Image (cartoon, helix red, strand yellow):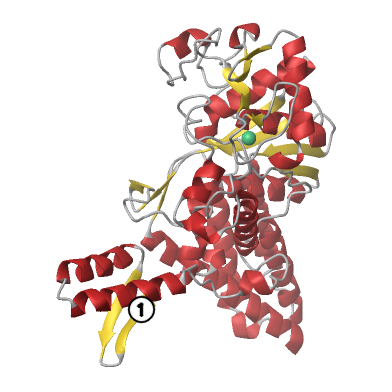
């Protein structure tokens, strides 16, 4: 809000009330999203290392997030509904099933990357009553109004609109984002609290008719329900500053008359191999994609937190393999300490003082606006101290080594998983493929070849290849494999 780093002062001393915007579960969550969730994770770990209690809420968006919400209010289609109509969506009976599938997948990836569980993970679809009540109250207070297409927040009724993003009402008119032209809107900058749509796949009854809530409203009501009128800290990716967080502030502060969040933290973008992640460039990395390629989940975590959150991060094949090497050092240190604890050799503690100092330096770096690059360097230095004496560690040194690795793991989550992963989470990640469909395409291709329609046969092969399925013609017939190169 102030464009400055400020001390994080909590309303209740020693208790951090923290909200971080969660994913929209219409697809697998990519590593750019996870970079943002990892910033939140590091906030919690650092606060806990300082002895604070944290109440952490992170939502699941399962309705209302539209394809053009970032650039044009209430524009485009609902992401959930569109996903159901896509090719991947054919695997699901309905939009609820699709949401459940991708939420489960998201939670598995969350555990694999060793993120702390929030105390509450509220879903938008389970807080419909609260959203309808909030929209009604905003109408009553004169902050919102109803039109034939929905309920809109009247931006003019909230004079400090734009205070987070700098997109004040005047600036907005200069096309900071295109807003949907709706003749019934009072100001084109007004944004939707409720969309009327009795054809929508997910709809609820409200005093304003059948429809569904706006994406921004869910975060306002769920943050308030679980954390109170004023939060200590609110997090998200930098792409959420505007319009999402700006709209959350306008709604919440109009409803309560109080400051919505005392502090804000936004994570900068992630690039992959120097480019913006996109499906068309083939660098749209999901956690499970990288696991399929043999990456260690903790190394993915390491690579994603290696750069400070205040700067864009370039995730490369090199940064991932460097991270694999570093994670290996932590694992070797952990193993050396464990076997020295079992061996129980006499001798003095020759490493405790050095390790305590390194831990304090790592913690210091984290309390300074989450400086992960210094913290990780200090943490690695500790592994050097342990591994230098690996085979000679006395019991006393091993105890210091264990304390160090435990504390580094609590702070950064890079030594081992905090909790044992369950079967689903450790299961080898297999790509979701529709085998019946592939087999039927292979038989179409064989028929095409027999009929000398080589153009069609080749097209089928190319189409499957583009989906990551490679066809191999063998003496026993055509077989298919999932391609494995990065
Ligand atoms: Zn949000």
Q: Can you tell me which quadrant of the image ligand 1 is in?
A: top right
Image coordinates for residue 3, horizontal then vertical, percent: 55, 24
In the image, 384: left or right of 126? left
Image coordinates for residue 74, horizontal then vertical, percent: 53, 26
SS under mark 1: strand
Residue 316 versus residue 165 in the image, above or below: below
Look at 77% across and 11% down and name the residue there: 140
Q: Is residue 397 visible?
A: yes
Viewer-side residue, 250 vs 395? 250
In the image, 176: left or right of 394? left
Quarter of the image containing the N terminus? top right
Name the quadrant containing residue 193: top right
Residue 137 versus residue 103 in the image, above or below: above
Name the quadrant containing residue 115: bottom right
Look at 22% across and 71% down and name the residue there: 457
In the image, 15: left or right of 292? right
């Amino acid at each position: 809000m102030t464009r400055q780093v400020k001390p994080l002062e909590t309303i209740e001393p020693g208790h951090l009330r923290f909200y971080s915007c969660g994913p929209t579960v219409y697809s697998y969550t990519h590593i750019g999203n996870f970079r943002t969730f990892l910033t939140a994770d590091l906030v919690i770990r650092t606060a806990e290392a300082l002895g604070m209690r944290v109440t952490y809420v992170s939502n699941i968006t399962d309705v209302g997030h539209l394809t053009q919400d970032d650039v044009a209010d209430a524009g485009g289609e609902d992401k959930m509904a569109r996903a159901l109509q896509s090719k991947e969506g054919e695997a699901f009976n309905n939009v609820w099933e699709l949401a459940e599938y991708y939420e489960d997948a998201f939670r598995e990836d969350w555990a694999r990357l060793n993120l702390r569980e929030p105390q509450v993970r509220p879903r938008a679809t389970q807080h419909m009553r609260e959203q309808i009540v909030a929209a009604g109250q905003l109408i009553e207070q004169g902050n919102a109004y109803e039109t034939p297409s929905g309920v809109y927040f009247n931006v003019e009724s909230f004079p400090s609109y734009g205070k987070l993003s700098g997109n004040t009402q005047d600036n907005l008119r200069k096309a900071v984002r295109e807003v949907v032209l709706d003749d019934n809107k009072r100001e084109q900058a007004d944004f939707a609290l409720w969309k009327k749509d009795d054809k929508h796949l997910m709809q609820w009854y409200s005093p304003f008719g059948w429809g569904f809530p706006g994406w921004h409203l869910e975060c306002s009501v769920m943050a308030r329900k679980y954390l109170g009128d004023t939060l200590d800290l609110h997090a998200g990716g930098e792409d959420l500053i505007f319009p999402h967080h700006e709209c959350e502030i306008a709604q919440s502060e109009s409803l309560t008359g109080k400051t919505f969040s005392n502090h804000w933290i936004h994570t900068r973008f992630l690039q992959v191999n120097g480019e913006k992640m996109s499906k068309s460039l083939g660098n749209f990395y999901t956690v499970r994609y990288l696991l399929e390629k043999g990456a260690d989940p903790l190394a993915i975590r390491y690579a994603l937190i290696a750069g400070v959150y205040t700067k864009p991060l370039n995730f490369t094949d090199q940064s991932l393999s460097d991270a694999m090497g570093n994670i290996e050092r932590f694992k070797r240190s952990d193993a050396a300490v464990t076997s020295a604890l079992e061996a129980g050799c006499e001798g003095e503690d020759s490493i405790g003082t050095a390790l305590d100092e390194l831990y304090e330096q790592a913690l210091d770096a984290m309390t300074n606006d989450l400086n992960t690059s210094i913290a990780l360097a200090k943490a690695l230095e500790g592994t050097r101290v342990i591994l230098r004496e690996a085979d000679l560690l006395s019991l006393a040194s091993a105890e210091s080594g264990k304390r160090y690795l435990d504390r580094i793991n609590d702070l950064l989550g890079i030594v081992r998983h905090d909790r044992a992963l369950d079967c689903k989470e450790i299961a080898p990640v297999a790509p979701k493929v529709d085998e019946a469909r592939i087999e039927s395409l292979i038989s179409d291709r064989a028929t095409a070849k027999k009929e000398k329609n080589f153009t069609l046969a080749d097209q089928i092969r190319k189409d499957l290849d583009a989906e990551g399925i490679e066809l191999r013609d063998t003496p026993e017939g055509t077989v298919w494999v999932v391609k494995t190169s990065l």
